[in-house]
Image (cartoon, rainbow, N blue to C red):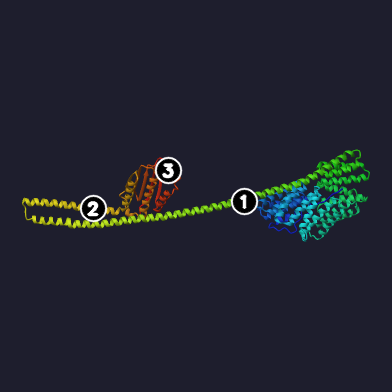
Amino acid sequence: MLIFVLFGCTQKKTDKKPITTSNDSLSSYFTLANDFNLSRQKRLSYIMKANEIVINQENDSLNRVNLFKIANRYFNINNWKGYKESVNLVLENSEKVSDTVSMAKGYGYLGDYYRVKSISDSSFLFYYKAEKMYDKLNDKYQLAKTLVNKADLLFRVGDLIGSEKEIFRVLRIIKDDNNDIANEINYDANNILGMVYNSMNEYGNAISYHQKALKTLDKMQIIGKNQTMAISYLNLGLVYVNLKNYKVANDYFLKGIEQQNIDNQDPSIYALLLDNLGYSKFKLQDNDGLPQLFYKSLKIRDSLNLNSEIISNKIHLSEYYSSKNDETKSLQFANEALILARKINRSREKLLALKQITVIDTKNASSYTKEYIRINEELQKEERKMGEKFSRIEYETDQIKGENSSLETKNRNLVYFFSGFTILGLFFYIIKSQKAKNRELLYKQQQQKANEDIYNLMISQQNTIEANRVQEKKRVAQELHDGVLGRMFGVRMNLEGLNQFNDDLAVTQRHDYLAELKNIEQDIREISHDLNREKSELINNFVAIVDNLFEEQRKTFSCKLFSSIDSNIKWDLAVNSVKINLYRIIQESLQNINKYANATTIKVELKKQENNIILTITDDGVGFNVNLKKKGIGLQNMISRAKECNGDFNVKSKKGEGTTIMVTIPLE
């Protein structure tokens, strides 16, 4: 007998503002899909056309708004498959871009879906998720709407106290707010409270809150207002049915039908009003329109496949025919109600059918009564279990959230740790790098000083050679003047004196003077050789410096050193930087051999090849792995010196096979 109408069973609220979009076709499809004067099939075709456009749009905020609009329109025609697909798609798109507002809204929509499908635990889970997200977003109106939906779900499963608790929480949230959104929430909250108190048999409170809902509705300007008012009149009528005040109930049902006819939107509401109007007339023994009102309602419900309401309809018909002493039809409708209730496995409907059939079928009343008691006990247990399940869902969801929060904290701490570690590592790297740069700078300073020393040594050597050259010139000049010229003058004078004589003595003397001239010629040749040697020493002073290095090596170390310097190299064409770097490369190589190679033989060769100077240094020492040692400072210094001269540096070595260094420098 008791049939409750929930606000969630009505259509999703139509958009209050006109749809604005760059696509006129999409706007038109949305408008036509919400035209309740069109057939369901026609509206579905417009929804599908709109959906084809929206799913191909870019995943932006407008696209997600349009997907929600499509879901709303699927909801309004009870197309649950399309509704769920649209909601899942918008959730998927929202998660990709971390749109928490759309995610919370999507969770709320899934809660609606599972509530309609009577999958209470899933519905509660998604409402709870939406509630937590809206609470975190500090969106009090969406939070309040979600709590209203949650309260409606609790009412459906029989948790009246839990539903009442959630509604009062809603009323505290929107307290003192006076706007369209707050009024809409206030209406839904009062409507549910009226139904809760009706189920608690607190009929005074039930009437009071339904009246509050109607007063709130008067202040609202919404599309489908007459439809909503029809629902309130229906709920008030149901309270008066419970009070057995069928006259007042009848009046409210008539008011509801009047409002329903204005909007002509939801046939399921119309069927409820017709059925309950027929029942109140039946109780008032007013047979006007009976049983046609019951059959008209049943026909609508059959077309909409509203099984649970069909059961109630058939129970009313059973009562009606029982009062007319038509036991056959009465029992027929009672049995049909019981069979359908068992088929859809709805405990409350089973209880209503069993209660009615027990009155009619007195022969089998005992077995029906036992079944009634068993189902009633199971229903009570199920309601308790459902309450416990909801509590467990809240606990487990909070626990997962806590674990996620803990994980986020751990991850954040790890990020802080590794960031700090990275900064510290970077700090040490900078210090180490700076020290390396300082060492490199110090090395370059030492290298520059060494280069200056070598240059000064070369200048000093040049000065020494120049001084020796001047001294040698002076000596040669003295020898020419005092020795050769004096002797030549004496020979010339004696030969002039002998020209007057032709005897044997004169011949002998001439022979002696000729021999003296030969001696003078030899002296001149020796002086010329000395001059040539002095010129060679002047030109090859770099060679002398390198030879000094080789001599120092031979004196200091036991390994044998073989050196060869090509005399065709024109050292006067080489700039000082080339000479300095070649000298340092030779010096560095000898030092490395002396320290590490344990060599017995060293070969150093400087030769000219085309227009290049080729320096080759070979030893028969222990060798090394070139790949591992290539970054050694000694090798790096030699490579750097070769590059300064625009030259090439190559090293070949293997463990146990000695080492060969080859430097090729262009001769400028």
Select label 2 or label 1 by which is in front: 1
Label 2 neighbour load within 10 Å: few <14, some 14-19, many 20+: some
Closer to the chain start, of discs 2 and 1, is: 1
Residue 163, how many percent across, how many down? 79, 51
Tell me how far mark 1 sits from mark 3, CA to CA: 47 Å
**In the figure, residue 207 lies in which quadrant?**
bottom right
Q: Tell me whether the residue at label 2 lies in contact with that at label 3, contact meaning CB atoms closer than 8 angstroms.
A: no
Q: Is residue 70 visible?
A: no
Q: Which residue is mark 3?
A: 624
Circle 2: element type: helix
Residue 174, how many percent across, how many down? 77, 58
Please determine whether, in this image, residue 558 is positioned above or below residue 148: above
Tell me how far mark 2 sits from mark 3, CA to CA: 48 Å
Tell me the amino acid under the disc marked 2: Asp
Label 1 neighbour load within 10 Å: few <14, some 14-19, many 20+: few
Q: Is residue 128 visible?
A: yes
Which numbered circle lies on residue 530? 2
Q: Is residue 565 left or right of residue 629?
A: left
